[in-house]
Amino acid sequence: MTIVTLTTDFGGHYAGIMKGVLKRIAPQAEVIDLTHDVEAWDVRSAAFVLLSSYKYFPDGTVHVVVVDPGVGTSRRAIAIRTRRYFFVGPDNGVLYPASEEDGVEEAFEISNPEFMLKEVSSTFQGRDVFAPAAAMIASGRPISDSGKRIDRWEGLEFWRIVGSRSADCEVVYEDRFGNLTLSLRGCDVELNGDVELVAGGRRFVAAKVRTFSDLKGGLGLLVGSAGFYEIVANRGSARSLTGARVGSRVSLEW
């Protein structure tokens, strides 16, 4: 049994239709919803969700991501085989951080009609291209059958510059609690004590903490479960306090 994960910004019934297509072509596949709550059109957040999640699944899992503001345009549909996994989605950078981290072995443009539904919509290629392609791969069809091999695809880098006493980075994800994940990893720099940060155009002092409960008030900085620093507030919203959102630049000094 092969696992197929789904990450989209769909909400509604669209993800359910994708699952129907997957099960019709690959009834033996186990389909797991990673999330369908990515902010609409937010490729960077979707890339972070995939990066922070893919490695916790068994080898051979097919990860499908459809956050695709360029649907129906000339952007390519691609399938990537890495050291341990398969990734399927639009060529807009959303697959790049995770696939690069695991180590790309080969990549293909999905162009074989056998890997698509007979009729391909210009607005719902999650159903018509990505779900069928993932199902074919999950069924054991070689990924090389999906189309022509490609050597280049759209990159997406989480921006950060780290100095001896400062760092500049960006917000790459915000969760439902208002915690703001930064592009700065815990392994990039070890922070202790108070840190001055500029976020949302305003200056704050944040306490470096280990857990949410260690923070008695105001803003804190901790290394989250994905290994990235997060701006947090204990039972409050760092997003509301700072006004920062995904894509916002954040500067830290210590």
Image: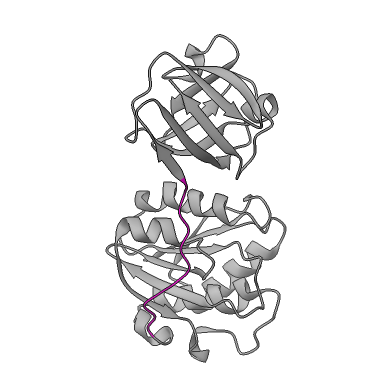
Q: Which colour scheme is used?
A: one colour
The residue shown at (53%, 62%) is 65
Answer yes or no: is residue 55 visible: yes
Where is 12 relative to 232, above or below?
below
Answer yes or no: is residue 26 visible: no
Q: Where is residue 179 in the image (x, y as percent from the top left)?
A: 58, 31
Q: Where is residue 196 in the image (x, y as percent from the top left)?
A: 51, 20
Q: In which quarter of the image is residue 130?
A: bottom right
In front here: 107 or 133? 107
Residues in magenta, as a range: 149-159
Q: Quadrant of the N terminus?
A: bottom left
Residue 158 within the segment the image draws in magenta = yes
In front here: 94 or 131? 94
Where is 236 relative to 228, above or below?
above
Q: In which quarter of the image is the C terminus?
A: top left
Q: Quadrant of residue 171?
A: top right
| Left or right position of 191 against 212 | left
The residue shown at (43%, 37%) is 184
Q: Main secondary structure of the magenta part?
A: loop
Residue 7 within the segment the image draws in magenta = no
The residue shown at (34%, 28%) is 164
Q: Position of residue 62 (x, y in %)?
A: 41, 65
In front here: 153 or 45? 153
